[in-house]
Amino acid sequence: MRMMRGVGVAAGVVAAVVLSGCSAGGGEATGSSPSVSPSTVAPSVEEATEDPAPVYPPGPEGEIDELADEKGWVVDDLYGSASGFVQDICDSLPTSGAGGASRPQWLAESGQMDGDQGEVLLVGVPKLCPKWTSAVKQAASGSYERWFTDGTYVVSSKMPTAEQISEGEGLPIPPGTYRAQGRMEDCYWERTSKGGEIIDNNFATSAQSITVTIAPSDGQFTSERCAVWKPVK
């Protein structure tokens, strides 16, 4: 009887251990989830950032640059900015071509008004050097006073096209009265017909002022060693 009681106790202990193990194993299988390695987490995508808006300095220079950027106006890379181009023209106007061309003439015929640069000057010159505003407007309109140095000019009121000028056709001299002033030595001028015959001419060993009237029917006008010929108003 004692042996039977001992076997029963041992069997009960074994059964309890087995049941306890199954219960623990089953709970772990159904209740736990697989662990995730940090390396498997997808990296976050950084949001794209836009370039910061340009900052313009206060004052007229900043206003010119801001408007040029808004309009998409482009000037020569030499100047770095639209306001830099305008300031260079303001500094150049008092001296560039001095004596040989009127200011609007210099602006138009030296290429300063080409492309977007004309628009930039129309906006910028009144802000940085307003005394030259009229010259810029005249250059933009194409209606301005033209002066003439030594050379031979075809007499015509019609201006050649840009293409004709690029092909070598010179600028004409419109009919009218012109005066050369200043100290002149051995100044020679002549008016000729379209066929080359001399209509009128003169040679001045020394002179301070010479006035010539060019007729619409003249063919050419030639000047040598004279001062600049300017229209008489």
Image (cartoon, helix red, strand yellow):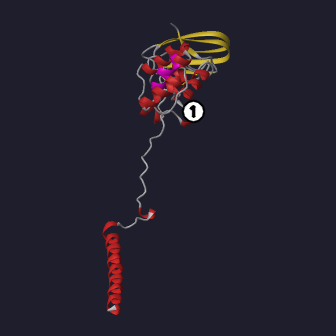
Residue 224 vs 37, above or below: the answer is above
Please provide percent x and percent y for residue 115: 45, 31
Q: In the visual, does 11 lie left or right of 44?
A: left
**Going 56% across and 20% down the picture, which residue do you hit?**
101
Circle 1 residue: 79
- Name the chief secondary structure element in magenta: helix
> In the rendered image, is residue 35 in sight?
yes
Total numbered labels: 1
Image quarter of the N terminus: bottom left
Q: Does the magenta stretch include residue 125?
A: yes
Which span of residues is magenta-colored? 119-126
Label 1, secondary structure: give it. Answer: helix
**Going 45% across and 64% down the picture, which residue do you hit?**
39
Dividing the picture into quadrants, the one containing residue 194 is top left
Q: Residue furthest front?
A: 1
Q: Residue 132 versus residue 99: which sits nearer the camera? A: 132
Q: Residues within 10 Å of mark 1 (few under 14, many from 20)?
A: few
Dividing the picture into quadrants, the one containing residue 59 is top right
> In the rendered image, is residue 114 in sight?
no
Please provide percent x and percent y for residue 187: 64, 17
**Going 35% across and 92% down the picture, which residue do you hit?**
3
Q: Residue 211 versus residue 22: which sits nearer the camera? A: 22
Q: Residue 142 versus residue 127: which sits nearer the camera? A: 127
Q: Is residue 122 magenta?
A: yes
Residue 47 vs 165, above or below: the answer is below
Please provide percent x and percent y for residue 216: 42, 15
The amino acid marked with disc number 1 is Tyr
Q: Which residue lies furthest to the top in this view?
A: 233
Q: Residue 19 versus residue 112: which sits nearer the camera? A: 19
Please provide percent x and percent y for residue 33: 35, 66
